[in-house]
Amino acid sequence: MTPPPRPAIVIAATPTPNGDLHVGHMAGPYLAGDVYSRYLRATGRPVVYTTCTDDSQTYVVATAHRQGITPEELVSRSTAQIERSLAAMGTLMAGLPPIDDRYRGTVLDYVAELHAAGRFKLRTVRLPYARNAGVFLFDGLVSGTCPVCMAGSCGGACETCGHPNNFDELLDPKYTVDPTDVVVYREQTILVLAMEDYRERLTAYYASRTPRWRPHAKQLIGELLARPLPEIPVTFPGTWGIAAPFPETPGQVLYPWIEAMPASIYATWWANAQQGKETAATDEAWLAAGDAELVYFHGFDNVYHWGLVDLVMLLAHGERYTTPDANVCNEFYDLDGEKFSTSRNHLIWSADLLAEVPRDLVRFFLALTAPEYQRTNFSRDAMHGVTTRRLVEPWNALSEALTLGLVALDTAAPLPTTEVGRRRAAAMLERFRLCYELPNFSLGRAAETVLTQLDRLRRSADSLDLSANGSAPVRPGDLLLEIRTLLSCVAPIMVEVTDALVAEGVDLRITGDQPHEIAPFRFPRLPNTADTPERTPALDGAR
């Protein structure tokens, strides 16, 4: 008996609800996670793709202060914007799960079990403190100089080199809400999780898994393991977030990054429930016994948290939970040669771009230029030029050639394929499989392979043999088979054009079978970047 396909859980980095998702965000983990999930689904794998807003982050407090609104108002508005942007991009996500009592209960149960098992330790640490405001500073509330690479950094971790800067490690700290406030240091007793206690298990894990990681992220993990591992704050003196339930730390809140794993577990449960797969136990899908493939998609600036802190949060529960098969990490995506910046208004909101340019062209260009191994750049001129010249024009030329050929053939009956055509289709499928599967998953190579095969098939259509016994190199059935294979493999990236074909009954599942006959089907045309799509409910009110 054939065993059932292995289930997969795909988690995109939890977005902080202090604003919408700009194009840089979307070109990173959110599109990549969606394409990987769609590929798995096309091969017959059960997959849930989800994320959860990170409401407890102090960046919410700092941004709300700058905008003159309450943190609660900012969270509500930003969550709605993020959800609309993910829907407008056409992701498989069922939406964003509510941060409700079930969410908070999941988080509190998760940490309470660790506390009861004695995993947390009391530590007295020095913390930066805004003297006039009377606020302890961490993460989004403090900025300064990274002690490792000397770049400007916020608290928690440096987005330039990726190294953590817990407690009093950040140099020249400033209160981000009021940089004129005097910053001093005060001691506080908090709970921590000592990562050094897990070094042996971490070393074994990374030895087996980091060969599947991209080089920059793998390098950072090596740097972190080469020195004493930091202690993870579990609680912090503050007022924004979930109140810590531990008697040793009255008046403190849970450190926001402590929520990431139970938040992801909760989001998985909620997403499954939207598909009619609700379970009584919130963490059932994450249990090690279920053998789910767990894959994270996030940026380099989150390697420390998603690659190390969150792993320790799972290991601290013993053998209860599955651990990630891979962390797929992207670099920064620039806009016109400079980093996306909300504070300088140097950005393009995803929803705005999608209101101007057809969704499939946006997804394709972001995939083609994805910042996978190094920083890459977005520009409107490049998007228009590249998609028009390399995608839309050859695509529509192939559509026209196939349409004329099938009209001349004048048949609705299935067409035979030959061994040569089946072999070519299988070879094409293998090229895409190497792009979509781990450890070498690459949006850029998948998109480039689309262009290569599209150009080849467009030229093949010129040699189409419409006679039953002709000697021309391309037969109608073979060409249709290869085009359907291309459509199946482009479907994880270009969702609108392929979803429409599936609705018409075209089978775009990705299998190893190469049929001996194939029914004729239409090859749809693509719009160009100047064709503004009709506005959808997913976009209404996004701005």
Image: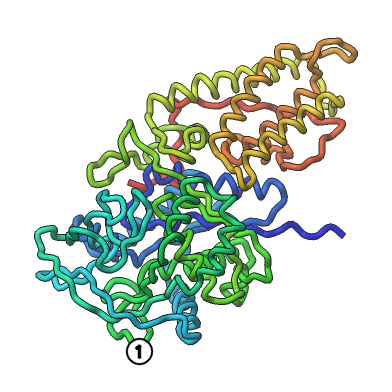
Q: Position of residue 126 (x, y in %)?
A: 24, 73
- Other residues around mark 1 within 10 Å, as few (<14) / some (14–19) / many (≥20): few
Q: Looking at the picture, which amino acid does disc 1 mark?
A: Pro
Q: Is residue 79 visible?
A: yes
Residue ID for mark 1: 247
Which residue is the extreme one toward the right?
469
Q: Residue at x 64, y 17 (%)?
A: 400
Q: How many marks?
A: 1
Q: Residue at 68% across / 21% down in the picture? A: 457
Kindly give the residue lying farthest to the front in the view shown: 226
Task: Look at the image and tell me whether residue 49 can be seen.
Answer: no
Q: Residue at x 53, y 55 (%)?
A: 296
Q: Is residue 410 above or below residue 370?
A: above
Foreground of the two, 387 or 256: 256
Camera-nearest residue between 230 and 252:
230
Q: Position of residue 80 (x, y in %)?
A: 38, 56
* Foreground pick, 186 / 526: 186
Give the vertical position of 377 relative to 396 (above or below).
below
